[in-house]
Image (tube, rainbow, N blue to C red):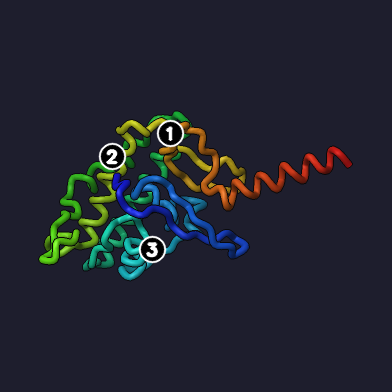
Amino acid sequence: MDSSATTGLTLRSHTGVAYRFDPGALCLELLTTGGPGPYRRYEVLHEPADLAAWAERSRLTPTPALKISAAEVTDARRLRDALFRVVLAHTRGEPHPPGDITAINEAAARPALAPGISPTGDRQWAGNPTGTHLVATVAQDAVELLTGPFAHRIRTCAAEDCHLVYVDTSRPGRRRWCSMEHCGNRHKVKALRARNAEKG
């Protein structure tokens, strides 16, 4: 997991309000692009440009200049869906689906993005990065997260109508919301209304 990067994605609620969401890990950022079953309706990875746009929004620094094929977009969706099912099972304390674990491991076994130094001394990505390198990088991040010290801190947002997944990397480990400015704020407003109704 790359914690040195500026983190967080700008998402939009169903009412169109923009808010910041930091899932705490690169692999969990991929879960905001759609998913299996009921999450299919949120699908945004349709073509190579969509995967490149996600990479630009992600915590990867700098943004890799990727050469992506249509098949690699399919690979990214396959990894994302497998990771989604594994993470949800993980948060519920259920066994990880074996087929999905295999899919993550197969993606993680491929060469990932390799960091390099530019002639001016800046960080860059070495070689000619492809969609396969990107997918492998995300898969390796997932392995690190699911087997690392914060594995027990992977959670879904406490709001009943929110399905965003994050890893709580805060020191106290008491994060409940995808975003305090979105679901956390909605909860505070709801609690305030309930208290006012009790008084009235």
Task: Classify mark 3: residues with Cα within 10 Å, few (<14), some (14-19) or many (20+).
Answer: some
Tell me, for residue 143, which label it has, or none. Answer: 2
Which SS class for mark 2? helix
Q: Is residue 175 above or below residue 35?
A: above
Q: Which residue is mark 1?
A: 171
Q: Is residue 166 left or right of residue 100?
A: right
What residue do we see at 43% from left, 47% from top?
A: 23
Among the two numbered marks 1 and 2 on one chain, the one whose residue lies closer to the N terminus:
2
* Residue 103 makes an appearance in the image: no
Seen in the image, is 197 located left or right of residue 23?
right
Please state which of residues 127 and 40 is positioned toward the viewer in this rendering: 127
Foreground of the two, 100 or 53: 53
Q: Position of residue 183 (x, y in %)?
A: 59, 48
Element assignment for label 3: loop
From the top left corner, tell me how far across and down residue 163 is, in percent: 53, 47
Earlier-in-chain disc, 3 versus 2: 3
Which numbered tag is attached to residue 200? none
Name which of mark 3 and mark 1 comes first in the sequence. Answer: 3
- Element type where label 1 sits in the image: loop
Separation of marks 3 and 2 at Cα, in angstroms:
22 Å
Amino acid carrying mark 3 in the image: Leu
